[in-house]
Image (cartoon, rainbow, N blue to C red):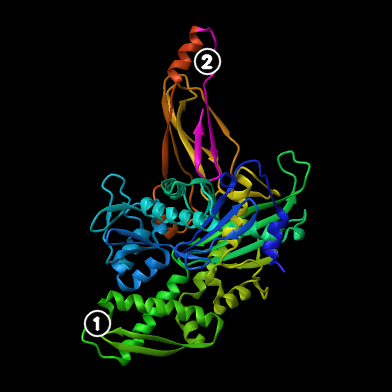
Amino acid sequence: MLPLSTATFLLLLFVNFRISDGAFAAMSVDFGSQNLKLGLVKPGVPLEIVLNKESQRKTANLIAFHNGERLFGETALQMSYKNPERVFPFVTDLLGKKFDNPVVQEYIKRYPYLNITADPERETVVFNTNDASYSVETLVGMILWNAREQVVVYGKTPIKDVVLTVPAYFNQAEREAVVRAAEIAGLNPLQLMSDGASAAVNYAFTRRKDIAEKAQYLLIYDIGASKTVASVIELKLAKENNSKVLDPVVNVIGVGYNRNLGGHVLTTRIRDYLIAEFVKTHKTKEPIYGNLRAMAKLLKEAERVKHVLSANTQTYAQIESVFEDKDFRHLMTRDILNDILKEIEMEYLTPVADALRMAELNVENIDQVILFGAGTRIPRLQDLLKEYFKGKEPNRFLNTDEASALGALYQAAHLSKGFKVKKIIVHELQLYPIQINFETTSDNSEKTLRRVDRTIFAYKSFYPTNRKIMTFTSHQDDFTVNLHYGNLEHLSKLQLEEFGATNITDVEIKGVTEAFKSAQDEGHVFKGIKAFFAIDYFGIVRSDG
């Protein structure tokens, strides 16, 4: 018997075969900080997760350089245990950030052995090797190029079109950096979907019969490697855009997040606990903290212990020749894991409270609490979530590892040419208001110019949007308007520091002088210049006129 998700795909996916298979193929990338999950859709094949060359369903999000060669995935991961200074981990966390951003500075503290400097012109991050220097977008572009090759080999078909998942909290600079990286990889990005929205799409097409006109509210709780995000989803059937048919509608109505709190934080704490136990029982000539290989081995074992204790009550942490030819073996129990977690456990619930507040809902309004992300397998965190929702049992309707990749893949099929899938309408949430600043004529007898701000995309509005029209009547020559973020008081102090610059860009309005002169020459009344602004499928503001 086919699994539910595969059977559903076969029922929902219809393919138009009028041109070659390769022209139709599309892919998705669930762009986790630690691992990538890749999806493929092509004629005659249901939506599926791509296996890498090790026949694994996820691939380490790593790049390494060795003897002039680039290494990816499992090969780079193995290199990180022997020569961690040659491997660049978690690089996606640095996309679109200036060098002085707290996220970048924390990264430098975590990996002091990496040669990281600031780009003298862009003030962004540069990774340096013995042979060359690379921007973050270039490294991520290389990782995506390898991901594309992996899908091409697996599917035996050319690939260009892709939908990528990103955290809902990514701002304009971060989103533009992801798009640039995808283009460097030779991909044609169709959309950037938030992790929560893509998981909700996966829920919608696997449980389509459960969706009704009466809205149901889902809280999707995602603990990834480097982040924790809670997304409140309104799911219902509705007629949109003059449609005569009721279609599933996914509305993201609340998001809470912590950029720095994920499963890796707990792994690091377990590693530090193991180091302390090693120091208690072993005398060494040199301190173990200064040995990169030993630290990498301990981090690897800490990750394994965390996974085992998520399903079992005890296990042994054991490493042969961890340092100075000394072996290490120590009993680990779930109680010890809970003690290690205790100091920070309540921080994992803050995104839930923030998401509910943004959605203007209470815990009683939530119909389903859905776990998503590998970190949600930890029993203590499941218990905390159950207590927070007053005994409501969290559900695992979604495949923890693959729901986001499959939801994004469904959207890739929808946006690509040649596929016809049943419609699922997705409205993403605009977390940051965007304003336009421009000059206009003062309402006085002197007709002086003054600068004003207007909100063009409000906080908690939906995107992608239709084009919004701005009419400028005070200019007879080319001029410039400024796009920037509006009030961000809903962000915490740390979130605001991590956010970066609040300026987005200057937009030059050209051709005004010629238009004004042409209107005068033809005897027309010049009524001003119209410019159009919209937020596209990438969550990026575009302008034209």
Residue 521, position as x, y percentages in the image: 48, 7
Q: Which residue is mark 1?
A: 287
Question: Measured along the vertical axis of the image, is residue 494 above or below residue 446?
Answer: below
Tell me the kind of residue under disc 2: Phe
Which residue, as the protein is rendered here, is positioned at the far left?
A: 285
Question: Measured along the vertical axis of the image, is residue 480 above or below residue 421?
Answer: above
Q: Residues within 10 Å of mark 2 (few under 14, many from 20)?
A: some
Residue 197 in view (yes/no): no
Q: Judge by depth and name the residue closer to the eye, 113 or 379.
A: 113
Dot 1: element: loop
Q: Judge by depth and name the residue closer to the eye, 181 or 393.
A: 181
Taking the spot 24% from the left edge, 55% from the top edge, the residue there is 131
N-terminal of the two: label 2 or label 1? 1
Q: Which residue is mark 2?
A: 526
Q: Judge by depth and name the residue closer to the eye, 398 or 395.
A: 398
Q: In the image, 10: left or right of 439?
A: right
Look at the numbered discs 2 and 1 and tell me whether their residues touch, using CB distance below 8 Å. Answer: no
Q: Residues within 10 Å of mark 1 (few under 14, many from 20)?
A: few
Indicate which label's residue lies in the foreground, 2 or 1.
1
Tell me the distance, in whole angstroms, between the alpha carbons under discs 2 and 1.
77 Å
- Would residue 537 be counted in the magenta stretch? yes
Q: In the image, 135: left or right of 38?
A: left
Stretch in magenta: 522-545
Which residue, as the protein is rendered here, is positioned at the far bottom?
A: 281
